[in-house]
Image (spheres, helix red, strand yellow):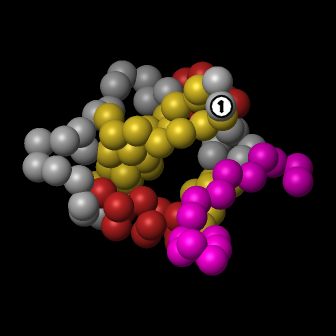
Amino acid sequence: MLTVTDKAAEYLRESLTRKETGAPEALRIVQTDDGYQLTLDNPKDGDQTFEQDGQNYLLLDSGVEEALSDATLDVHESPHGLSLTLTAGGN
């Protein structure tokens, strides 16, 4: 199962406070030709759902869930501010 650090969960939940009214409720990690990206989406049957205090903040479909099963999602400070990092397991 993907590990989401407390700092990453807080970062994702904070970013959702800035979404437009009526926008999908959570962020989804999707696989693209360039790697993984975040997009706004609503939960679907079979999703792995990460929630805190009753708020869904991160969604994974079964394919992404399997691919990231040993990965960690974290936040690190860079010269440009905070950014998410996805680290594969075993590193």
Image position, residue 50 (x, y; %): 44, 49
From this view, report whether residue 91 is shown above or below residue 69: below
Q: Quadrant of the C terminus?
A: bottom right
- Residue at left offset 40%, top offset 39%: 39
- Pick whichever, 74 or 50, lies toward us: 74
Horizontally, residue 91 falls left or right of residue 13, namely right
Q: Main secondary structure of the magenta part?
A: strand
Image position, residue 74 (x, y; %): 62, 63
- Residue at left offset 23%, top offset 39%: 24
Image position, residue 62 (x, y; %): 55, 24
From this view, report whether residue 77 is shown above or below residue 32: below
Horizontally, residue 32 falls left or right of residue 12, namely right
- Pick whichever, 46 or 68, lies toward us: 68
From this view, report whether residue 8 is shown above or below residue 48: below
Q: Is residue 59 visible?
A: no
Query: Mark 1 highlights which residue?
Result: 34
Q: Quadrant of the N terminus?
A: top right
- Residue at left offset 59%, top offset 26%: 32
Q: Is residue 68 visible?
A: yes
The quarter holding residue 65 reads top right
Amino acid type of disc 1? Asp
Image position, residue 77 (x, y; %): 62, 76
Label 1 neighbour load within 10 Å: few <14, some 14-19, many 20+: few
**Label 1 SS:** loop
**Residue 13 part of the magenta-drawn span:** no
- Residue at left offset 57%, top offset 72%: 80
Question: In the image as oriented, which residue stretches furthest toward the left?
Answer: 21
The quarter holding residue 10 reads bottom left
**Residue 87 part of the magenta-drawn span:** yes
- Pick whichever, 11 or 53, lies toward us: 11
What range is drawn magenta here?
Answer: 76-91
From this view, report whether residue 53 is shown above or below residue 35: below
